[in-house]
Amino acid sequence: MSTSEARGVVESWRALRTPLLVTGVVVLAAIVVLIATSSQTSGTFSPDSTKADGARALAALLKNHNVDVHGTESLDDATQPGDGKTLLVAPSGSLDSPGWQRIARAEWSHVILIRPSGAALRALAPGVQLSGDSVSSGSRQPGCNLPAAVKAGTATVSGPTYIAPGAATSCYGDGIYNTVVRLQLGDRIIDVVGTATSFTNDQLAKDGNAALALNLMGTHKDLTWYLPQFESTGVNTGQDGPPLIPPYVRYIGWALAFAVLITAIWRGRRLGPVVAERLPVIVHAAETTEGRARLYRRSRARDRAAAALRESALGQLHKAHGIPRRADPSAVVATVAARTGRNPAMLYELLYGLPPLTDAALMSLSHELDVLTQEVRHP
């Protein structure tokens, strides 16, 4: 018994080792890719993204002007001491108020908020408010004396607008609603920029967008490019809060699903042409009939046995007289009676009557049906 069990374990391992190996390789490859890309940022306005809404062209422009750009998705990197450095907060992800307060306490010399939320404005740019209006994409003059905007000249602006306090400098608007606002808070400079798409790969080369971005973001040689993701000190269950499932969990799930799919395709049953196989035993029709008769006898199924006998006899009668298979019983009886000279009433009872109640009656029915079919075949 132990030898049989051991053999079953070995056979199971031989059947499963290849699928397990394939699944392990796929999952390992997914983990390696995840680790290799963990140091890169992704998403809208990312310094590593080459998509239309990415900002790799802007990051390259800044690096060409000796600005060291550090892309990060970690809140801890955005809350390090920032004296003499610039922090750019991209319009992605979500943070709650405690997270923004931590950034505000980090003492960055220059903070650039790209399309910030109300919580970000309250923590970092007091007095600046979202207007609730937005401007469609178009070219505008600075309309202010901010050196960065004056040097850039006309820029392509779009997106939300802001209402700034009297001490702030407002640009690219109508004097009340503006897309660029600079606020001086002691030694700290806060820039609020609502026109995020102007600095993307798709729009950077238009008008003076590149010059405006360089003048705003190149004030220090060290720039931390922060893309808020899913780190938050509080619990946020609103629509703008972080997702319940981090993205790397979804990546691993998709990798496992892909591995299962590959294994199912590889090990799945394939429908090919029918293969003729030699039967191990030839069973004659007479033996099959005898075996079925014994089953009927054992279960006392005289009704089913009689029905089988009558169906066989009717088949022979239909064939001998050319009677359709769905012919009415009266038509069958009339045809057979005309051929054999038998009483139609007796023929109807023989072919369509009640099932026999005893084995002797069943044997008698079988004999009479055999005689009838013989008469038809040999009149």
Image (cartoon, rainbow, N blue to C red):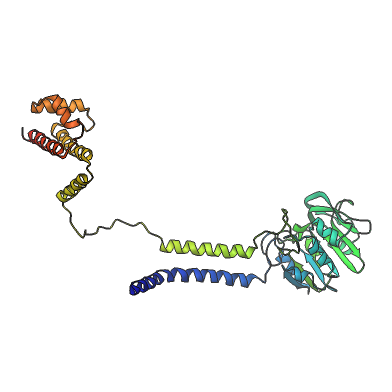
Q: Residue furthest left?
A: 379
In which quadrant is the N terminus drawn? bottom left
The x, y position of residue 259, in whole percent, is 50, 65
At horizontal 6% and vertical 35% (from top left) the residue drawn is 378
Q: Residue furthest front?
A: 358
The x, y position of residue 236, in whole percent, is 74, 57
Name the residue nearer the viewer: 296 or 166.
296
Judge left or right: residue 88 versus residue 249.
Answer: right
Q: Is residue 334 above or below residue 99?
A: above
Residue 216 visible in the snapshot: no
At horizontal 15% and vertical 38% (from top left) the residue drawn is 362
Residue 292 visible in the snapshot: yes
Residue 151, quarter of picture: bottom right
Name the residue nearer the viewer: 8 or 277.
8
Judge left or right: residue 294 versus residue 122.
Answer: left
Q: Is residue 338 above or below residue 257?
A: above
Q: Is residue 153 above or below residue 361?
A: below
> Total number of numbered labels?
0
In which quadrant is the C terminus drawn? top left
The x, y position of residue 102, in whole percent, is 81, 67
Q: Residue furthest right?
A: 166
The x, y position of residue 127, in whole percent, is 89, 57
Residue 13, quarter of picture: bottom left
Residue 264, quarter of picture: bottom left
